[in-house]
Amino acid sequence: EAAGGEPLVAIDQEGGRVVRIGPPALALPPMRKVGDRGDAAFAERLAEAQARELAALGITMSFAPVADIHTRPENPIIGDRAFGETPEVVARFAGAWARGLARGQVLSCAKHFPGHGDTTVDSHLALPRVERDRAGLDAIELAPFRALAKEPAVHSMMTAHVVYPALDPAVPATLSHAVCTDLVRTALGFQGVLFSDDLEMKAIAIPPGEAAVRAIAAGCDAVLVCSRADMAAEVHAALIKEAEASATFRTRCEQAFERMSTMRRTLAPRAAADEAELAAILEGSRAIAAELSS
């Protein structure tokens, strides 16, 4: 919970193959199909319609938009989740998606920083690397995030469990101070919340409690443990233990909590009062669903 007890309920509901809620909720295609339409205003309206449904269901955050660029056809994890193949297209449509979510009163999260589009390994299964030099990263992977860092509707970002030797050769971005603090805060100037990706993924090869402490110390504000309650309890205990032992780490946790609380107060989503109101909101999505299929 954040902001004095206000719940933060987040979901992966990108569209395409990454959805958690099916019919009668609005069925979205992969974001690549949205980008290929070339109409950012339509993307914004589509995101707003989805957000109104999510808010009505009591969901306050969508882990979207994907701000990765589809630069490698053999990439097993991004592919058509990306809006396009160039930084310009991805920045334009990811920004529109974030604004649409905000208009529907749902918080957004641009992912996966600093860019997962050029990998050949699924970070759920192993640790990927992106070997592009720093100039290449600046021109390609980082370009959408640089633009989104200035977009008020982008309330948070999510790290990638990927090693970028040009940024930090030693550890994946999630555990890297050079990425999570020096790059996110100093170079990009982003002041929103920074989430880790799921610490259960096999790209993180250290115990989850240790990983959580290192991620927060590196600059993440919140860590995700998405399916195992026992692992979540282990992570929570490790964070408390480190905060009690280290004044520096406790200060970092307090800073993270303040960012989370500020973000949660940014919007005021309201769940549907009853089934009739929810049905009316779902019905309201039919027009744009028809437009989407046309």
Image: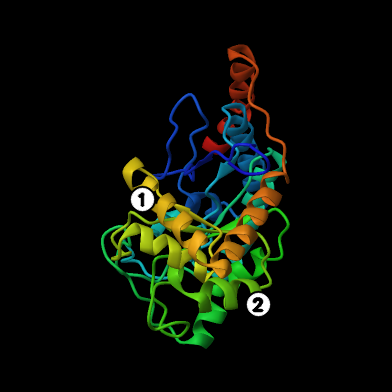
* Residue 113 seen anywhere in this rendered image of the structure: no
| Residue highlighted by disc 1 | 234
Q: Secondary structure at mark 1?
A: helix
**For the residues carrying marks 2 and 1, which lies nearer the camera in this image?**
1
**x 66%, y 56%: residue:** 259
Judge left or right: residue 22 versus residue 202. right
Q: Local crowd at mark 1 within 10 Å, few (<14), some, or many (≥20)?
A: some
Q: Nearer the viewer, residue 127 or 288?
A: 127
Q: How many marks?
A: 2
| Residue highlighted by disc 2 | 186
Q: Nearer the viewer, residue 150 or 71?
A: 150
Q: Quadrant of the C terminus?
A: top right
- Which amino acid lies under the numbered mark 2 shown in the image of this protein? Thr
| Residue 187 in the image, given as x and y percentages of width and height | 64, 78
Q: Local crowd at mark 2 within 10 Å, few (<14), some, or many (≥20)?
A: few
| Residue 80 in the image, given as x and y percentages of width and height | 42, 55
